[in-house]
Amino acid sequence: MTDMRVNIAGVELKNPVMTASGTFGSGEEYSEFVDLNRLGAVVTKGVANVPWPGNATPRVAETYGGMMNAIGLQNPGIDVFCKRDIPFLQKYDTKIIVNVCGHAPEEYLAVVERLAEEKIDMMEINISCPNVNAGFLAFGQDPKHVEELTAEIKKIAKQPVIMKLTPNVTDIAEIARAAEAGGADAVSLINTLTGMKIDVNRRTFALANKTGGVSGPAVHPIAVRMVYQVANAVKIPVIGMGGVTTAEDALEFILAGATGVAVGTANFVNPTATIDVIDGIQAYMEKYGVKDIHELIGAVK
Amino acid sequence: MTDMRVNIAGVELKNPVMTASGTFGSGEEYSEFVDLNRLGAVVTKGVANVPWPGNATPRVAETYGGMMNAIGLQNPGIDVFCKRDIPFLQKYDTKIIVNVCGHAPEEYLAVVERLAEEKIDMMEINISCPNVNAGFLAFGQDPKHVEELTAEIKKIAKQPVIMKLTPNVTDIAEIARAAEAGGADAVSLINTLTGMKIDVNRRTFALANKTGGVSGPAVHPIAVRMVYQVANAVKIPVIGMGGVTTAEDALEFILAGATGVAVGTANFVNPTATIDVIDGIQAYMEKYGVKDIHELIGAVK
Amino acid sequence: MAKFKECAKVVSQERIGTGIFSLWLQTEQVAGEAKPGQFINLYCQDGSRLLPRPISICEVNKEERQLRIVYRVAGKGTAEFSGYSKGDEVEILGPLGNGFPLDRMEEGKKAFLIGGGIGIPPMLELSRELKGEKQIILGYRDELFLNEELAKNGTVYLATEDGSAGTKGNVLDAICAEGLSADVIYACGPTPMLRALKAYAEEKGIECWLSLEERMACGVGACLGCVCKSKEVDSHSHVHNKRVCKDGPVFLSTEVEL
Amino acid sequence: MAKFKECAKVVSQERIGTGIFSLWLQTEQVAGEAKPGQFINLYCQDGSRLLPRPISICEVNKEERQLRIVYRVAGKGTAEFSGYSKGDEVEILGPLGNGFPLDRMEEGKKAFLIGGGIGIPPMLELSRELKGEKQIILGYRDELFLNEELAKNGTVYLATEDGSAGTKGNVLDAICAEGLSADVIYACGPTPMLRALKAYAEEKGIECWLSLEERMACGVGACLGCVCKSKEVDSHSHVHNKRVCKDGPVFLSTEVEL
Ligand SMILES: Cc1cc2nc3c(=O)[nH]c(=O)nc-3n(C[C@H](O)[C@H](O)[C@H](O)COP(=O)(O)OP(=O)(O)OC[C@H]3O[C@@H](n4cnc5c(N)ncnc54)[C@H](O)[C@@H]3O)c2cc1C
Ligand SMILES: Cc1cc2nc3c(=O)[nH]c(=O)nc-3n(C[C@H](O)[C@H](O)[C@H](O)COP(=O)(O)OP(=O)(O)OC[C@H]3O[C@@H](n4cnc5c(N)ncnc54)[C@H](O)[C@@H]3O)c2cc1C
Ligand SMILES: Cc1cc2nc3c(=O)[nH]c(=O)nc-3n(C[C@H](O)[C@H](O)[C@H](O)COP(=O)(O)O)c2cc1C
Ligand SMILES: Cc1cc2nc3c(=O)[nH]c(=O)nc-3n(C[C@H](O)[C@H](O)[C@H](O)COP(=O)(O)O)c2cc1C
Ligand code: FES
Ligand code: FES
């Protein structure tokens, strides 16, 4: 038998495969296609302290081998989320990771505090949000802000904290080290790469927001490079994501040093992508006689 | 009749379409398929002050919707280049843009100085090369180094200088402004995005160099975003590249603010890609009654 | 409302107008659940095009488990589909969305079934399943399609932009010109048409169901890509947004802002 | 040496072994120029796979302008090709590379034509065009293919890893076991085989032409993706590198380092 269990910050997942925030709602919609009990964890759509309406439409566009989105982090706010989404997920034998967003440290902290009483396993902090107190840049583009925000969150968080890194930076390893220095229990990456698409016939932007985040197989090699860099720069566990569509894609992250992997855009292409990835990793382990997934984590140096 | 002429730093190109450095040699190999006289310019493979052997093989790998390369800037050195490649290109009625690489400012300057006597139209400085005097980072990842290097080159360059920017940065507009402050006559972008591919069956890196530069349609939306940002941040002309395969791809760059566009990876997929892009832009202009390509440059705000 | 992802087989494909194709698909399960006004997601075979293409259900043959869609070639995905022929396989997901509410009509009531351009196809299955008097108003630019098939299930009124058939103008011009009235409106078509119908229906106090279109990714309500503006705070989103793919594509005109 | 990019049509495709396919293509121009040891680039129809797949020319029919390739399904691209059937179109570029030098042989001279595994196909056209005595040594893991066709053009000696046919072992084992000798060697196959042949030929002082394989992008010498190490500074690159796609794929064993 193959052992696919991994431990991230003291939380044991039955396998390394989770959903990427924002691509799986809170699991309900895909529960028609996927047995949620089989997932290592469900990572929920980003939630803020109050409801966010998100951006104008069009919010999504196809790109070559990928897609672009500017949902604008629409969410019902933490109160509704705790009343509705957490109880839904608690019915399943999987881990619950709540993705948190905010425009300012206070907003993140309000959510983190509110989550203290909730039966969730971890939280993932989306630091790709623009920091309203610090101009245009996202929190995650400045190591100083990352370390400070991480430290503030860690002070009050009752569950392990994953800092989710943006790839739109010069040196992702530096950002990961800042998160580690701030006390993060794990890091996840990559969030989307900022892109733009222009409709040349209508001479307008494809997305109402002008720019959007690129995801899907097109970004996979960039994500693998960043996960490798980060896994070799920090001691805390790394969760890899960006374009995972097949078990091979996920295994690239694992061999590069990721303890967990998330499946995002692929859900839109194939609603059972998460399960196919889990089954594929298992088949790979059996084929090559890998007894424990830890034999694979970071095995390519 | 449609007027496709553009002027970059005083040099008039018959159309905005050029080749992306490193994907077209010095034009000879593709001259079997392409009438070089039709191109706005030929941008040559990067050349250094002395011959560079480049990296070990495998040097190229396919990625989803793109490719990855780690050629390692193999080149015969500036002396051979001036004797062989420039005379070859001078036989054609197109502009000659020589791409220059180096590991240290002195190396760039040696090439720039050597080019002074040569009948070339412009030079393009590849600042994605790692700066041996400043750790791992490429010149192009630090605005200070970009401004300094640009200023030094401008002091001795006899032809207009295009600084070619790397996309592996937090804020490409800041880098472009640094190039402009240093006196650059134009900027071109994007160079490749650093990526990694792992062969999960052989458990090894797909490229001998471990990492490589991702190019092709997969990176196009990221490139368009960066060109838009840069075109709105500097006054000097911008040359856009990254994934241009069709006229529509090129027009996205032009509408985003690029005065010129380069075709790279697409040459490998379709040897006549440059010509197809030129013809396609012309057809677009005729379809929409665009008389002068300047009506399109930066038309989407 | 079960949904299925399956590999359907092309039964037949026919070009029924300039750039307009009619495709019958053999399904295992999707056809069995399909209702008028719902749609299916079609996935491209070419791996560079990841996102599914949402296409309305035009006709359902439950016995044979077959589905018909009618679509216009609008870009690369639909161009790919137009090359399919008998026996080819295509991945589909469906049936998706809520569909038109059939229970708003009964014998003795009068309905408008209004289709504009490529919004016409869903009216075919609707016209087959709906009870009561069916006045089918179809708006075209110039070339007609599906109108003869629709005429079997109700009275068809035409409007063409160039006046080459029926009333010159749009569907509302046809309604006025013909002096038609209805108890319920069902409509699908371009947003300007839907906006005009919304105003018309609210002015006349007619119950009006509009099928909206928006760019989509997941098609199942998970990504929040495809929202429209709702008049009230929506009970799911808790903001003024409804998901076209899941809460729609059919909305009561008074619920949404266009 | 003109090269052409064209859209070829599949004449026929046949499975000739486990995962091994033989494909005849109708070309306009490529077949007319093709020489043994050259290769063509095949482009995938699926847009997610951009780079061409280099495949050796196995057989040429100049009158009919047809080309044959024989390939093993190694990944997604070759898997795509294996699904093609009569009438399907495939973009190709070719003929590429230098090919084997036929003028090194003449009547009265003896040659080894050595193919290992999926390096066997180019030996077929070579064996048809080469003059002199042709000793064709073929190395397989277990399952044989093309050996009967090759036997029509020379004397075939087999080596199999499992000993199921011919000499148990590799091609050099077969040469020793059969006590063969030659004036010129032409070989294509896995790098370890080529490395052993290079040593063998240099030791015996035999002229030896090796067809190398490397990952490629452009296939025409422009990208410098596919280099091999050259013994001397190369006259084109001015470093110790030669381009496999353009300066090769066939090199004199003494020119290159493996
Ligand atoms: C609920 C619904 C039902 C529809 N029913 C039909 C129908 O019955 N017949 C028909 O011809 N068309 C229908 N459409 C429109 C159809 O989805 C698009 O024409 C089609 O997706 C275009 O794909 P493409 O690859 O050819 O175009 P491209 O422009 O190449 O597509 C690029 C991307 O944009 C999306 N897209 C492009 N146009 C539209 C659009 N108008 N609406 C939504 N997404 C779009 C595509 O799905 C794809 O993700 C429907 C749309 C929706 C939302
Ligand atoms: C000059 C030359 C001649 C060849 N002749 C033949 C032949 O006659 N028959 C045959 O079966 N094979 C031949 N090959 C190998 C053949 O090119 C690969 O098996 C094929 O490209 C694999 O493509 P794929 O999409 O199936 O595999 P994938 O692994 O999915 O391919 C991914 C990428 O790697 C490249 N690649 C993978 N394996 C190789 C390889 N071994 N050599 C070069 N590139 C590779 C592909 O071209 C593609 O760009 C030849 C290779 C070269 C360089
Ligand atoms: C539609 C969509 C919505 C997303 N929403 C969120 C979000 O709310 N919070 C977050 O941290 N990341 C969000 N992401 C980013 C994904 O979680 C993931 O990091 C990224 O898409 C890369 O993975 P993929 O290529 O597998 O999709 C979103 C991505 C998509 C495509
Ligand atoms: C094989 C290869 C070699 C390259 N060599 C160079 C180079 O020598 N100098 C340089 O500035 N850019 C080089 N580039 C980058 C391209 O010029 C271009 O910036 C990049 O590939 C993006 O464009 P594309 O997507 O159209 O290929 C190279 C790219 C490729 C694929
Ligand atoms: S398309 Fe994802 S929510 Fe509608
Ligand atoms: S593949 Fe480009 S030089 Fe050989």
Image (cartoon, coloured by chain):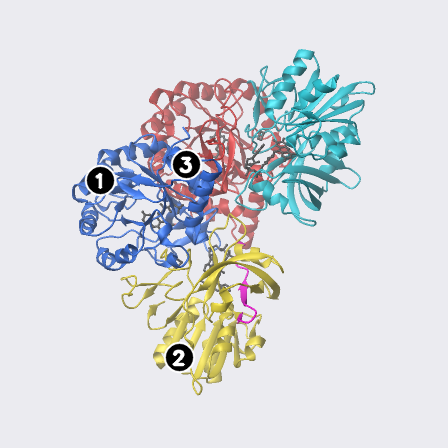
Chain colours: A blue, B red, C yellow, D cyan
Report if the beta carbon of the residue with label 3 is closer than 8 angstroms to ligand 2.
Answer: no
Residue A257 against residue D182 in the figure, above or below: below
Label for residue A38? none
- Density class for disc 3 (Cα within 10 Å; few <14, some 14-19, many ≥20) is some
Q: Nearer the viewer, residue B6 or D115?
A: D115
Q: Position of residue A53 (x, y in %)?
A: 28, 58
Residue C244, can we see it?
yes
Q: Which residue is mark 1?
A: A150
**Viewer-side residue, A128 vs B242:** A128
Task: Name the foreground residue: D172 vs B15.
Answer: D172
Q: Which residues are magenta?
A: C60-76
The image quadrant that residue C256 belongs to is bottom left
Q: Chain of mark 3?
A: A
Q: Nearer the viewer, mark 3 or mark 2?
A: 3
**Of the residues shown, which amino acid type is indicated by label 3?**
Lys
- Nearer to us of marks 1 and 3 is 3
Query: Is B297 left, or right, of D248 in this rendering?
Result: left
Q: How far is disc 1 from disc 3 in space, using C-alphas?
A: 36 Å
The residues tagged by marks 3 and 2 sit, at their Cα atoms, a distance apart of 60 Å
Distance (Cα) linking label 2 and label 1: 55 Å
Q: Is label 2 on the same chain as label 1?
A: no
Q: Residue furthest bottom?
A: C108
In the rendered structure, the answer to whether residue D251 lies left or right of residue C242 reads right
The residue to which callout 2 is attached is C104
